[in-house]
Image (cartoon, rainbow, N blue to C red):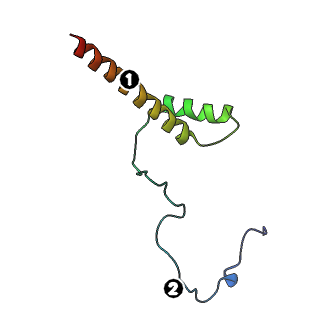
Amino acid sequence: MSADVHDKDDMAEEYDFSEAKQGPILASRPHATTIWLHVDNDLLDWYRAQVHAQGGGDYGEIMHEALRLYREYAESIQACRERAKARE
């Protein structure tokens, strides 16, 4: 039997959960909302490859960076359109 396997006799008869807190193990990020998002496999594979190439990390952070860059791009395009319209 491996050292990782515990006999059922190792279990206590009773456990005290009076101080336990319900909820996620990891604290959520401030100013962030958890959503379910379907991502195409080719995109997810690319982000994972980027993390691997960097020696590890969180592909979610790279996705956040990409979304923020896109937002900046979209805002700058909108500002250019508004300036062009004002000159008409």
Q: Foreground residue, 33 or 8?
A: 33
Among all residues in the image, which is located at the extreme top? 88
Q: Which residue is mark 1?
A: 76
Identity of the residue drawn at 52% across and 78% down: 20
Q: Is residue 20 above or below residue 81?
A: below
Q: Which residue is mark 2?
A: 18
Image quadrant assignment for residue 12:
bottom right
Identity of the residue drawn at 58% across and 89% down: 14
Q: Residues within 10 Å of mark 2 (few under 14, many from 20)?
A: few
Among all residues in the image, which is located at the extreme bottom? 13
Q: Nearer the viewer, mark 1 or mark 2?
A: 1
Image quadrant assignment for residue 54:
top right
Identity of the residue drawn at 29% across and 17% down: 83
Helix, strand or loop status at disc 2:
loop
Q: Is residue 43 left or right of residue 2?
A: left
- Circles 1 and 2, Cβ within 8 Å, touching? The answer is no
Identify which amino acid the numbered label 2 is placed on: Ser
Q: Find residue 22 and report its horizontal and vertical position in percent.
A: 46, 72
Distance Cα–Cα, label 1 vs label 2: 54 Å
Name the N-terminal-most of marks 1 and 2. Answer: 2
Q: Is residue 26 above or below residue 52?
A: below
Helix, strand or loop status at disc 1:
helix
Q: Foreground residue, 71 or 25?
A: 71
Q: Find residue 80 and report its horizontal and vertical position in percent.
A: 33, 18
Q: Residues within 10 Å of mark 1 (few under 14, many from 20)?
A: few
User: Which quadrant of the rendered structure holds the C terminus?
Assistant: top left
Image quadrant assignment for residue 73:
top left
Identify which amino acid the numbered label 1 is placed on: Ser
